Image (spheres, rainbow, N blue to C red):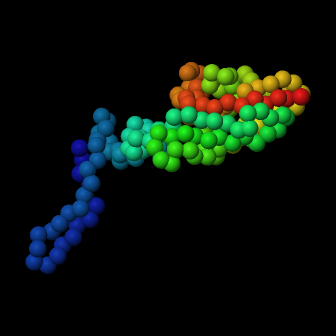
């Protein structure tokens, strides 16, 4: 360890005071100023801490409903969340996770090319004909690389592409 003197303050009639910093010497003997943690590491740690702590009020999302239950080509869907504590019924359209997926709540990447949904607005891709499932809900961790999120709880609606 190496101490580096930053400034000396000498006040008449008092003992001189030194402000200094301590730096860790590396194995070669050179001094290195400690680097602050990268912003991404700080944000990740903060997010994990907040998720682990939760809100502390015991309120949790119990179920999600999507309306209307079906749309064609392009449709605006809304999501309503039912919570365990008051207020129990809340419009979560702008705050929930939306995706195209399967009826078991899995957001699937392979069907995402047929249609997409952003903020509840679902739209068919040009040239696709068929029906896709629109999902809204609370996202869990992805099951693996290149796999979609599993929503729990979630609600569904159908989008028919002519």
Toward the bottom, the furthest residue is 12
Describe residue 85's horizontal placement relative to residue 5 as left or right: right
Describe residue 153's horizontal placement relative to residue 4 as left or right: right
Describe residue 30's horizontal placement relative to residue 70 as left or right: left
Question: Residue 66 at x, y = what percent?
Answer: 67, 36
Question: Residue 146 at x, y = what percent?
Answer: 63, 22
Q: Quadrant of residue 32?
A: top left
Residue at figure coordinates x 59%, y 22% from the top left: 145
Residue at figure coordinates x 39%, y 45% from the top left: 57
Question: Residue 121 at x, y = what percent?
Answer: 75, 41
Residue at figure coordinates x 44%, y 38% from the top left: 51
Q: Quadrant of residue 133?
A: top right
Residue 50 in sight here: no
Question: Is residue 162 positioned above or below 1 on the image?
Answer: above
Question: Residue 82 at x, y = what percent?
Answer: 55, 39
Residue 3 in sight here: yes
Residue at figure coordinates x 11%, y 69% from the top left: 15
Quarter of the N terminus within the rendering = top left
Quarter of the C terminus within the rendering = top right
Question: Is residue 91 positioned above or below 4 on the image?
Answer: above
| Nearer to me, 88 or 99 | 88
């Amino acid at each position: 360890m190496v101490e580096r003197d930053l400034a000396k303050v000498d006040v008449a009639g008092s003992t001189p005071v030194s402000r200094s910093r301590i730096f860790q010497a590396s194995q070669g003997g050179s001094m290195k100023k400690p680097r602050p943690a990268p912003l991404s590491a700080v944000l990740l740690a903060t997010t994990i801490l907040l998720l682990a702590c939760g809100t502390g009020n015991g309120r949790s999302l119990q179920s999600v409903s999507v309306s209307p239950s079906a749309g064609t080509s392009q449709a605006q869907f809304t999501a309503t969340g039912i919570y365990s504590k008051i207020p129990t019924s809340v419009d979560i359209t702008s705050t929930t996770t939306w995706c195209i997926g399967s009826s078991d709540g899995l957001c699937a990447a392979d069907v995402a090319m047929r249609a997409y949904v952003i903020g509840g607005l679902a739209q068919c891709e040009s040239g696709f004909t068929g029906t896709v499932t629109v999902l809204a809900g609370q996202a869990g961790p992805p099951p693996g690389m290149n796999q979609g999120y599993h929503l729990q709880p979630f609600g569904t609606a159908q989008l028919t592409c002519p």
